[in-house]
Image: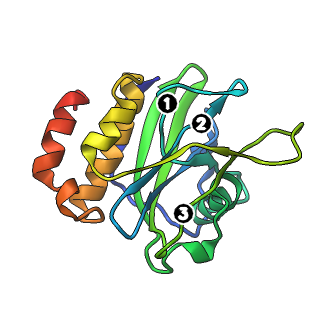
Amino acid sequence: MVLKSHTTEPFALHGRLPASAYEGERPTVVAVLRSQGGEVLMVLPQKAGKHATNAWMFPQGPIERYLSPYQAFDQLLQDECCLASSDVEPDSVRALCTAFSQTASGLKRYFVLFGTLRPGVRPVVKLSDEKDVHPKTREVFFASGPNCVWSKIGDDRQAKRQMIVQVLEMAVRKRLLVNDRWSPERFAPFLTHAGH
């Protein structure tokens, strides 16, 4: 996967995506969820029945044609994190950015939404396993700053690292991550490591 471009162009949270968004691969909603303490949620996806090693990422899922990005975000919260809309601060959800990557089957679009979890809310991320009646939990990690993120993604594919870095950089620039651990000064070495 090679990252083609990154844009800060806004997209409508509550409107359906244009048909052109579905050319190539199905568009994906990405959830950047901040705790009240300023930490960012990352999950370890399940691949081929086992945990993928060092493949930490933000929760993400498809945007079906009949859903708006916000509705897909809401569905993602329920399906992947066992959270309800009420677990996120009501006015905190916003369109952060759109990212693109070129894959073997075409251009993939990521619509990134940002939200703040209510005090005391901690997700229980479940694995989909149709054979198991009892849901399993997926590993979750709350990154408290760039160094914590880098410790989880440093050996991953460059394109994925770049996307994570770009999304976090956007959140820092928009002052959505504002504590000392996410200051631009602390973020600068992270950008260098990621080849940004």
What is the C-alpha distance between the residues marked 2 and 3? 17 Å
Name the spot of residue 84 as percent of width and height, x first.
65, 70
- Up-down: is 78 above or below 117? above
- Which is more N-terminal, label 3 or label 2? 2
Q: Secondary structure at mark 2?
A: loop
Rendering coords of residue 142 (x, y %): 42, 52
Label 1 Cα neighbours within 10 Å, binned few <14 / some 14-19 / many ≥20: many
Colour pattern: rainbow
- The disc label shown at residue 122, or none: 3
Label 3 element class: loop
Check disc 3 and give the amino acid type. Answer: Arg
Please give the residue where the numbered disc 2 appears in the rendered image: 45
Is there CB contact under 8 Å for labels 1 and 2?
Answer: yes
- Residue at which label 1 appears: 55
Cα distance in 3D space between marks 1 and 2: 7 Å
Q: Nearer the viewer, mark 1 or mark 3?
A: 3
Could you tell me the amino acid type at mark 2? Pro
Which three-letter amino acid code belongs to the residue tagged 1?
Ala
In the image, what residue occupies the spot 22% across and 32% down? Answer: 196
Is residue 134 shown to the viewer in this render? yes
Tag 1–tag 3 contact (CB < 8 Å): no
Which residue is at 20% across, 37% downward? 191
Q: Is residue 59 left or right of residue 146?
A: right
- Residue 20 visible from this viewpoint: no
Spot the residue most to the left: 185
For residue 100, what is the image quadrant?
A: top left
Binning the other alpha carbons within 10 Å of mark 3 as few (below 14), some (14 to 19) or many (20 upward) gives some
Disc 2: CA contacts within 10 A as few (<14), some (14-19) or many (>=20): many
Spatial CA distance of label 1 from label 3 is 21 Å
125 lies left or right of 188: right
Pick whichever, 95 or 88, lies toward us: 88
